[in-house]
Structure formats: C-alpha cells, structure tokens
Amino acid sequence: MALLINGEQFKSESAVATVSGDFVCKSASGFATVNTVADNIIWIAHTVNTFDADNQTVDMDRVIYAAKNTWDIMRVEVVADATITIADEGKFYNINTNGTVDVATASTVQSYTDASGASATAALVTYQLELIRFVSTAASIYRIV
C-alpha cells in the first residue's frame, strides 16, 4: 500500500472494500474499485470502508483518494518472499491482487508487445510501477507509470 498526500472523491462501485493506501482504478461501469493486476492505477484510496451492495444506485458513497500524477513517487510494500536489490532500480513491475509488488514480473522495459500467445493479435504488456530507489527488501520507493 502507498502513502497518501491529498484527497478528492469519486463514487464507489457496489460491494467494494477499501483501506487507506489501496490502489484504485475506474471500473467498466464507471465507478471507483480496488485495482486488479491488469488495471492501470488511477488513484490511491484514503477511505477505509466496505461499500454496500447497492452503492452505485442507492447510497452513492464515495472513495476519498489521492490522484495519480505521471511522476508520483510513493513507498510501496514488496512481497515478503521477494528478493529485490539495489541492482533492480529502474525495473518495472506489476502489483499483486493484495497491492504488493509482484517481483516475478520484473522487466527492464515499461511496455512491450507480446506476440507469444495463441491469439493472432499481439497484446501490449504494460507495467504499473517503476523501482526508483531500493531501500530494503521489505519496502522501497516506486513511481506509478
């Protein structure tokens, strides 16, 4: 989870649980929801709440968030079994579903075209974070990309 600076608000998707520091994205229905592995990080939650199942239509409660800017830098947890060193600075990563850095996704490029799949169409693979400064194996400084 990330450290937070400022706060704005956006309506939450129904039945979503957020804690302060969660990475948040915009759902297909246009509401704020907790980020998943493949989503672009748009916001960082300030809200600790479990939104009701009818939030989109009845309650319309909002997630308070810090907006992601292109060069936002924040401290992010690294998975416990990760082996990350100062040599990994500048590499790009995705996050796990629990919001920690997925060290297994390390890449030296921010995005690439993956033509190795069974599909005839190549997929653009992009990463969510860049390691800016190694601090320790428990937590380091990352930039949202």
Image: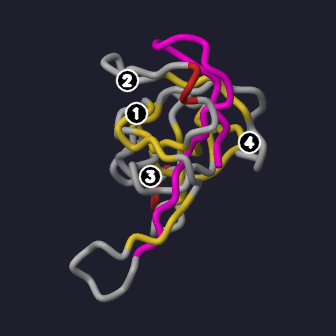
Q: Amino acid at mark 4?
A: Glu
Badge 1 amino acid: Val
Mark 4 is surrounded, within 10 Å at the Cα level, by few (under 14), some (14 to 19) or many (20 or more) other residues, namely few
Is disc 2 surrounded by few (<14), some (14 to 19) or many (20+) residues within 10 Å? many
Tag 3 residue: 55
Residue type marked 2: Val
**Image x and y of residue 31, in percent:** 52, 59
User: Is 82 or 63 nearer to us in this picture?
Assistant: 82
Quadrant position of residue 110: bottom right
Nearer to the camera, 101 or 22: 101
Q: Position of residue 42 (x, y in %)?
A: 62, 51
> Which residue does the numbered mark 2 point to in the structure image?
79
- Asked if the residue at tag 1 contacts the one at tag 2, i.e. Cβ–Cβ closer than 8 Å, the answer is yes
Q: CA distance from mark 3 to mark 2?
A: 32 Å
Mark 3–mark 1 distance (CA, rounded to whole Å)? 35 Å
Q: Which residue is mark 4?
A: 8
- In magenta segment, residue 136: yes
Q: Which residues are magenta?
A: 123-145
- Inter-mark Cα distance, 2 to 1: 7 Å
Cα distance, mark 4 to mark 2? 29 Å
